């Protein structure tokens, strides 16, 4: 019987200032650190038989390069682009070029915040979005991406 090839990892990419989670405005973003979120996401992905490549950068170009890398080395993308969500057409274009499912995630409920956070260039290129559920949103995003990859 031919051996089943291993699925490529899912990419979970995090943008500017998310390295500060845990101490950054905990009343808005919660108290979980990015390292905790990474562990929880990896555990959730394991339950679906998936591996995770979890990364953070404060630099737009890094995120774009990693989205490009995901075209050949990833099976799908979970993206919290931080404030770049609301400004970066370059990240929007990279997402459009990915050709794989994308789940946008935000810890905070963007719709209930300042008007400048109501525009998301990521949402326009994503398969779907999860916002306002704190760190738990990442685990839900893993579930959603796993379901999309099953389709
Ligand atoms: C965020 C929301 C953005 O508006 C903000 O700039 C962030 C975090 C979130 O996860 O809630 O850095 O993406």
Image (cartoon, rainbow, N blue to C red):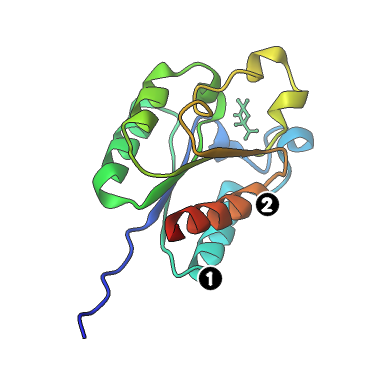
Chain-order first, disc 2 or disc 1? 1
On residue 24, the disc is none
Q: CA distance from mark 2 to mark 1?
A: 15 Å
Badge 2 density bin: few <14, some 14–19, many ≥20, Cα 10 Å = some
Label 2 element class? helix
Q: Residue furthest left?
A: 2
Badge 1 density bin: few <14, some 14–19, many ≥20, Cα 10 Å = few
Vertical relation: 95 (above or below) 140:
above
Residue depicted at 60% across the width and 18% down the height? 119
Vertical relation: 66 (above or below) 139:
above
How many numbered marks, from 0 up? 2
Residue depicted at 53% across the width and 29% down the height? 123
Please provide percent x and percent y for residue 70.
31, 44
Q: Is residue 105 visible?
A: no
| Quarter of the figure with residue 29 | top right
Quarter of the image that includes the C terminus: bottom left
Quarter of the image that includes the N terminus: bottom left
Residue depicted at 50% across the width and 68% down the height? 48
Viewer-side residue, 53 vs 33 = 53
Please provide percent x and percent y for residue 16.
51, 29
Please provide percent x and percent y for residue 63.
38, 33
Q: Are the residues at dot 2 and dot 1 in contact (C-beta closer than 8 Å)? A: no
Please provide percent x and percent y for residue 129.
59, 38
CB at disc 1 and ligand 1 closer than 8 Å: no
Viewer-side residue, 28 vs 89 = 89
Residue depicted at 70% across the width and 44% down the height? 134
Label 1 element class? helix
Residue on which the image places disc 2: 136
Q: Is residue 56 visible?
A: yes
Q: Residue furthest top?
A: 116
Give the quarter the ligand 1 occupies.
top right
Residue on which the image places disc 1: 47
């Amino acid at each position: 019987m031919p051996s089943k090839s291993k699925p490529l990892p899912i990419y979970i990419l995090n943008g500017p200032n998310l390295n500060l989670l845990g101490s950054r405005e905990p009343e808005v973003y919660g108290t979980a650190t990015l390292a905790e979120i990474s562990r929880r996401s990896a555990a959730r992905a394991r339950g679906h038989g998936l591996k995770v490549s979890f990364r953070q950068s404060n630099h737009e170009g890094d995120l774009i390069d990693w989205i490009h890398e995901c075209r050949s080395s990833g099976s799908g993308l979970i993206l919290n682009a931080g404030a770049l969500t609301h400004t970066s057409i370059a990240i929007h274009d990279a997402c459009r070029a990915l050709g794989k499912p994308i789940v946008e995630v935000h810890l905070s409920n963007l719709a209930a915040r300042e008007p400048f956070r109501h525009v998301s260039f990521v949402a326009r290129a994503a398969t779907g979005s999860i916002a306002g559920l704190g760190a738990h949103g990442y685990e839900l995003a893993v579930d959603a991406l796993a379901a999309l990859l099953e389709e």
